[in-house]
Amino acid sequence: MGLFPAPIYAETVLEHNFRDAQRFFLEALLELHYAHTLMLARQGIIPEASARACIQALNALNRSELHSVRYDGKYEDLFFYIESRLEALAGAEHAGRMHTARSRNDICIALYRMISRRETLNILKALSGLRGTLIGLARQHAADLMPAYTHTQPAQPTTLGHYLMAYVEVLGRDQQRLQAAYATINRSPLGACAITTTGFPIDREYIAAQLGFEGLQLNSYGAIAATDYLTELAGAVATAMANLGKFTQDLLLWCNPTLGFVRLTDAWVQISSIMPQKRNPVPLEHTRILASRALSEAQAVFTCVHNTPFGDINDSEDDIQPLVFTMTANAQRALKLINGVLADAEFNTLRMSELASADFLTVTELADTLVRGEDLSFRDAHHLVSAAVRVLEGRYSATAMAAATVELASATIGRSLRLSVDELIAALDPRHFVDIRTIAGGPGALDAALTAATFDAANAAHWIREKEQRLAESAAQLREASDTLLA
C-alpha cells in the first residue's frame, strides 16, 4: 500500500497533465472561477462576504507563480493546487464555498471548449487571410491564360484567375465548416456538474454569458459525455488540410523549371550545399508537411475517442487536449506560411499562355464549332476532330489542325465542310476558348464569381470580428461584475 500518487503515475501522467493545464487552461480556469463565484452570490447560494473574499483572493493570485510552479505530487492537478492557494488567501471557510454546485467534470469540459473556440477563430483568421490573398491574385490574373489539367495531362485552356478562384471557393467552404464547428463548441456545459446537474438554484445562462458562451450544452449527461464538439472541429480541420495539401502539391509542380509557372522570390527559397544552381521551394514543402501533420492529428483525435464509453472518461479529457491544440497550431502554421509565399510569388503568365496554346488544348471548342456551324451531332464532330488529332501525331498547330479537319471531313462524316479553314483556326484560339465560356462558374464569367467571393469573404471576416468582440465584451463584463461586487 503506497501513498497517492504512485511515482510512475506522477511521472507519466500527472506531471504532464499539470504542465499542459498551465500552458493551455490556466487563464480560462481563473475566468471560470470568477464567473462561478459571481453566479453563486447572485443566486444567494453563498454569502456576499464569501464571494468578495474569493474574488479578492483571485485578484491576489500570483499569475507568474501559477505559470511556473512545478508539479510536486502534493496536489493531484492544477485545479486543486489553485484551490489550495485560494484557501491560503481567502481562508478555507470562504474558498471552500466556491466549489458549490460544480464538478471538475463540467469545469474541464468548459475549459476545453473555451480554448477550442479560440483556436477555431485563429484558424478562421488564417483561412480568411489566405482567401483574401487569393481573391486579389485571381482578380489580378483574371484574363491570364493557362492550361488546365485532368489526370495530370494538359486538357483545356483556362485562366490563372479561374484556377485560383476554384481554391477560393474551397476556402469558403472550409470557413463554413469551421464556423459550424465553432457554433457546436461554444456551448456551455457548466451546471452539468458531475453529470446530473445540482439541487442548488444555479443560473446556467448567466455563467454561460459571463464566459462568452452562446447558449448551453443543454442535457447535462451529454454535456459531460459527448465528444462531437472535438470531432466536428477535427473533421473541419482535416478537410481544410486535405484541401490545402492538394493546392500546395500543384504549386510545387508549378515551381519546377520544366513547367515554370511560379517563381518564388529569394526570400522564400533555400539553396543547396553542393549544387550552386538550386532554388528549392522548401516553404511549400513545409506547408505540405504541416498540413499533413494537422490532418494526421485530426485523425488521431477520432481514434482516441472511438469506442470509448458515453460518459465521463479520461480518454477524451486531459491527454487528448494537447493533441487537439497541436492540430490547430499546425493548421495555422500551414495556412500562414502558404499565404506568405503566395503574397510574394511571381507567376510566369507568358509561359502559361504558351502552354495554353499548345498540345491540342482547344480542340474541344473545334468540335463544338462543328456542331454549331455544320449541324453535326457532337459524337460525329468528336470523331472528325479526333481523326485529325491522330493524323498530326502530336505535332500541333492551329493551321495544321484546321487543314486536317477539312481534309478528313468527307471520309469521316460523308461530306465536305461549309466552314472555312480560317473559321476553324479562329475556333482554335485559346482566348476565344475562354471568352466563349460565360456559363456561371466558367473562366469567361469570372467577374461575377469575383464579386460574389469578395462579398462572401467580407461577411466571413465580419463574422470573425463579431465573435472576437463578443468574447472580449464578455471578459470585460466579467471584470466589471467582479469589481462591482468588491465595491
Image (cartoon, helix red, strand yellow):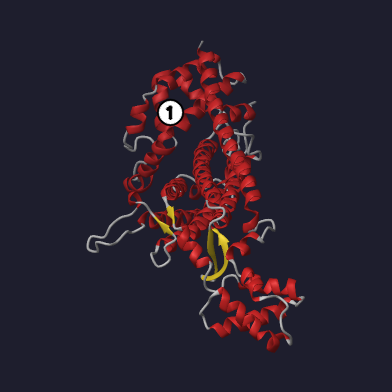
Q: Nearer the viewer, residue 252 or 473?
A: 252
The answer to whether residue 308 of the structure is visible from this angle is no
Q: Residues within 10 Å of mark 1 (few under 14, many from 20)?
A: some
What amino acid type should be assigned to the residue bearing mark 1? Glu
In the image, residue 425 sits, relative to residue 188, either above or below, namely below
User: What percent of the width, then of the height, locates residue 57?
Assistant: 43, 20
Question: Can I make out residue 120 in this image?
Answer: yes
Q: Residue at x 34, y 38 (%)?
A: 73
Residue in the picture at 52% in, 73% down: 359
Give the percent coordinates (x, y) of residue 441.
65, 56
Compare residues 257 and 43 and report the one nearer the observer: 257
Q: Return the residue found at the far left.
A: 274
Judging depth in this view, the residue of 237 and 217 nearest the camera is: 237
Residue marked by disc 1: 83
Pick out the residue farthest to the bottom.
Answer: 411
Q: Position of residue 391 (x, y in %)?
A: 57, 85
Q: Identify the residue at image location x=39%, y=25%.
A: 85
Find residue 4 and report its image quarter.
top left
Residue at position x 71%, y 80% in the image: 417
On screen, residue 222 above or below 434: above
